[in-house]
């Protein structure tokens, strides 16, 4: 009953009625008690009234007996007085003890009445002892007044009791009657109100709400037609009906949109229960599997999946058990016509009416899987040779190394192969021939390899083979077979034949490999040793190989150090003053590059520039120096005292288009006067290519720069360069200047060079001036400019922040110096 509005209203009404009835019962009980009290008061009043009447009778008899005694009738008068006096003590005690006389005023009246009766008794007794003459006087003078006083007291007592007790008792009875009538009327009124409220609730609230609830139930179950809704009623009911109508419109709109989405989405959506039976099948799923919705509903979803091997069965079982919720799973499905295809399936769970259901979003991913397989293949294979690439090989090598560490014996070997004559083919027959050579070598390696072997091209002409399940002896047999196969191979292209050999380095994978051991580096070192031993052979890595490859490691280390310096800004600029003799006034600053080691030490250019030239990094360093010198001058991050700066260039950079582009870009990018920049290049650079040097100098002078011939006299000293190369400065090599204070021959050479330079209009700068005596000798032979530790060491500008080497792009046309 409590679950319905009607039942709750009835229960509430019964509770209210019971509470009101209890209140009415309590009121009736109080009224009955009041009535009983009133009756007790009235009975007490009449009891006292009888006592008072008895007292009055006794007073009348005493008065009558007194007059009989006064008349001389002693016998009759005495008896009458005695009879009258006999009940007076009892009457007085009854009045004194009666509860109704317990108040102070009544107690005083009772006491006064008792006193009057006792006094009257004494007078009556005294009267009987008197003679006749005295009796009449006493009756008139004392007894009659005493009787009248007693009458007054009795009258006052009777009046007071009547006024205060009897009136209150009757009034209380009247109130009780009125309360009783009011309670009965209230009970009737409450019953009528509850009945009216129930009718109003039933017809105005419960029944309209019941109709709305039935309509919502019908709507929720998806039945049609919709139930009619009440059109009239209280404002709240109309508001509820309006809200329901709005909700119904929104639900139908959303349902329509959802049905449209389900029917027009490209992904199939299948709803199935915990038993795997299909409950829903949208249009895309019907198209995908070839089943109509009516045919599919009731089928088991397992009927749509292929389960003919362990893999497909396990995948289907995982799907049906709900273990792949929220994760995309790839399965093999079958259409109605028996055609199989790759299926992507993502399952989610939901519940309706405590029934757990599943939604599977499915799609045909055959093309996507094929594309993914293709992308995976491209990511793992070398595009030229179709062998595994370096990245995938390194991953497999890491796994194999870890397995070898956990093993007990050697179980794999790494073979590093470097072709012996690949550069010759590339340089003489062209890159296309080189690519063809790599393809043919890859085919030969693939043909020779076992099914379990892992063959990869690491880059260039380097190949690697990871042979599994072999020991040292087996690795030697495999390496020898690859070596003989390459030795027997002759590459033919463009009518020419080239014998191709290979150097093979072998590193074994076993439990002795500790953490941090680079197996690939071991094989690479072994390969270099094989090359050094005469090529076309194989060599097993030995710990002694580390000592024999110190120079190779140093070269690799220098290359990494220089590349890291260029990439991470570990180069910095130093400035050394070039002064005028004999005043010592600074006229120029030579800009020198320094390299900061990871340990914080500083390397001068002489410590690394030769390696940089040999490794092909000299031009990169020159580009960095040009860009940062111009930037430092433009930003004011250079020493003060002179506005002209001399920049050293490597001989390898002359003729390199990157350097020309860097100079043109820096000139355009920064507000630096070209006349304040002097570019220095060595005599040996001019000797290497005089034509390139002349063309480069003319291009620089055309832009407004000044030039200097550096280290003159150090290598191929010839005055012809002073005539052929139009430079603004000539810098004497320090080997000629260092000892002129003690070597007359060097002094004579410097004097001659000073005379020739002056005759040709060139300014001579002497390097390595280490003391005042050398400076004085230079001034004596006419040298005007000098630099060295005597005048100042190369120092960085204190606020300098070297920039990272930028990637340069041609921004200004520069002459091709090819």
Image (spheres, helix red, strand yellow):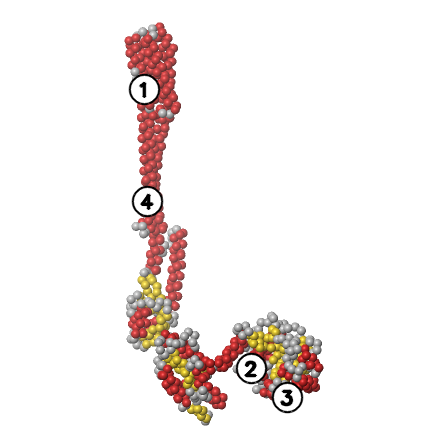
Q: Whole-Å distance between the Cαs marked 3 and 4?
A: 130 Å
Residue 178, horizontal then vertical, whole percent: 35, 34
Disc 1: CA contacts within 10 A as few (<14), some (14-19) or many (>=20): some
Disc 2: CA contacts within 10 A as few (<14), some (14-19) or many (>=20): some
Q: Confirm or deny contact between disc 1 and disc 2 (CB under 8 A).
A: no
SS for dot 2: helix
SS for dot 1: helix
Q: Whole-Å distance between the Cαs marked 4 and 1?
A: 57 Å
SS for dot 3: loop
Q: Confirm or deny contact between disc 2 and disc 4 (CB under 8 A).
A: no
Residue 287, horizontal then vertical, whole percent: 34, 73
Of marks 1 and 2, which one's residue comes earlier in the chain?
1
Above or below for 131 versus 88: above
> Mark 1 = which residue?
91
- Which residue appears farthest toward the bottom when viewing the image? 495
Of marks 4 and 1, which one's residue comes earlier in the chain?
4
> Mark 2 = which residue?
610
Of marks 3 and 4, which one's residue comes earlier in the chain?
4
- The residue mark sitting in front, 3 or 1, is 3
> Mark 3 = which residue?
718
Q: Which is more toward the observer, 311 or 621?
A: 621
Q: Whole-Å distance between the Cαs marked 1 and 2?
A: 154 Å
- The residue mark sitting in front, 1 or 2, is 2
4 relative position to 553: left or right: left
Q: Confirm or deny contact between disc 3 and disc 4 (CB under 8 A).
A: no
Q: Which is more toward the observer, 444 or 7?
A: 444
- The residue mark sitting in front, 3 or 4, is 3
> Mark 4 = which residue?
15
């Amino acid at each position: 009953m409590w679950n319905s509005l009607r039942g709750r209203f009835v229960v509430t009404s019964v509770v209210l009625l019971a509470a009101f009835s209890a209140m009415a019962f309590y009121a009736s009980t109080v009224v009955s008690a009041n009535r009983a009290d009133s009756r007790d008061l009235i009975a007490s009043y009449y009891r006292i009234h009888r006592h008072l009447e008895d007292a009055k009778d006794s007073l009348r008899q005493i008065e009558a007996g007194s007059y009989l005694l006064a008349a001389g009738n002693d016998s009759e008068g005495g008896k009458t007085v005695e009879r009258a006096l006999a009940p007076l003590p009892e009457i007085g005690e009854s009045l004194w003890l009666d509860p109704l006389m317990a108040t102070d005023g009544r107690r005083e009246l009772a006491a006064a009445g008792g006193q009057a009766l006792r006094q009257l008794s004494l007078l009556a007794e005294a009267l009987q002892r008197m003679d006749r003459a005295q009796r009449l006087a006493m009756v008139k003078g004392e007894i009659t007044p005493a009787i009248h006083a007693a009458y007054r007291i009795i009258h006052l007592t009777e009046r007071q009791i009547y006024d205060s007790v009897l009136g209150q008792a009757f009034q209380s009875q009247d109130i009780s009657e009125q309360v009783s009538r009011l309670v009965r009327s209230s009970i009737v009124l409450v019953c009528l109100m509850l009945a009216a409220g129930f009718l109003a609730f039933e017809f105005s609230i419960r029944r309209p709400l019941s109709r709305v609830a039935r309509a919502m139930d019908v709507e929720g179950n998806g039945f049609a037609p919709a139930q009619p809704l009440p059109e009239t009623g209280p404002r709240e009911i109309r508001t509820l009906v309006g809200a329901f109508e709005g909700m119904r419109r929104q639900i139908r709109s959303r349902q329509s949109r959802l049905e449209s989405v389900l029917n027009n989405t490209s992904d199939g959506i299948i709803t199935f229960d915990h038993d795997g039976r299909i409950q829903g099948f949208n249009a895309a799923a019907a198209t995908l599997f070839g089943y109509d919705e009516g045919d599919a509903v009731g089928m088991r979803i397992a009927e749509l999946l292929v389960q003919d091997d362990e893999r497909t069965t396990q995948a289907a079982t995982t799907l049906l058990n709900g273990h792949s919720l929220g994760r995309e799973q790839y399965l093999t499905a079958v259409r109605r016509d028996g055609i199989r295809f790759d299926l992507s399936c993502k399952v989610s769970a939901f519940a309706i009416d405590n029934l757990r259901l599943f939604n599977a979003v499915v799609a045909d991913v055959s093309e996507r899987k094929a594309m993914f397989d293709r992308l995976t293949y491209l990511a793992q294979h070398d595009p030229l040779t179709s062998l595994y690439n370096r990245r995938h090989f390194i991953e497999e090598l890491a796994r194999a190394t870890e397995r070898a560490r956990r093993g007990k014996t050697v179980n794999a070997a790494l073979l590093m192969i470097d072709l012996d004559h690949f550069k010759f083919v590339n340089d003489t027959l062209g890159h296309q021939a080189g690519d063809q050579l790599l393809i043919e070598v890859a085919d030969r390696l693939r043909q020779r390899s076992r099914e379990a072997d892992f063959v990869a091209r690491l880059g260039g002409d380097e190949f690697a083979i990871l042979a599994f399940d072999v020991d040292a002896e087996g690795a030697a047999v495999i390496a020898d077979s690859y070596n003989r196969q390459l030795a027997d191979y002759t590459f033919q292209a463009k009518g020419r034949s080239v014998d191709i050999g290979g150097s093979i380095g072998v590193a074994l994978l076993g439990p002795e490999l500790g953490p941090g051991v680079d197996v690939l580096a071991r094989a690479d070192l072994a390969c270099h040793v094989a090359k050094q031993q005469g090529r076309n052979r194989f060599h097993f890595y030995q710990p002694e190989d580390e000592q024999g490859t110190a120079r190779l490691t140093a070269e690799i280390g220098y290359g990494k150090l220089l590349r890291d310096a260029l990439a991470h800004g570990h180069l910095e600029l130093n400035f050394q003053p070039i002064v005028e003799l004999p005043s010592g006034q600074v006229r120029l600053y030579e800009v020198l590059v320094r390299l900061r080691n990871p340990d914080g030490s500083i390397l001068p250019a002489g410590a690394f520039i030769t390696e940089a030239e040999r490794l092909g990094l000299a031009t990169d360093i020159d580009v960095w120096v040009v860009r940062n010198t111009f930037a430092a001058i433009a930003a004011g991050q250079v020493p003060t005292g002179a506005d002209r700066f001399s920049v050293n260039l490597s001989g390898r950079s002359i003729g390199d288009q990157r350097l020309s582009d860097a100079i043109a870009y820096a000139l355009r990018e920064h507000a630096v006067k070209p006349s304040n920049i002097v570019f220095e290049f060595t005599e040996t650079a001019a000797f290497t290519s005089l034509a390139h040097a002349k063309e480069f100098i003319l291009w620089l002078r055309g832009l407004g720069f000044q030039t200097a011939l550096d280290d003159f006299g150090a290598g191929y000293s010839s005055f012809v360069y002073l005539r052929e190369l139009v430079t603004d400065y000539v810098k004497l090599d320090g080997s000629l200047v260092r000892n002129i204070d003690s070597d007359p021959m060097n002094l004579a050479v410097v004097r001659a060079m000073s005379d020739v330079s002056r005759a040709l209009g060139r300014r001579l700068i002497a390097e390595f001036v280490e003391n005042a005596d050398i400076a004085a000798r230079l001034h004596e032979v006419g040298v005007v400019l000098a630099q060295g530790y005597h005048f100042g060491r190369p120092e960085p500008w204190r606020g300098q922040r070297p920039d990272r080497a930028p990637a340069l792009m041609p921004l200004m046309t520069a002459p091709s110096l090819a």
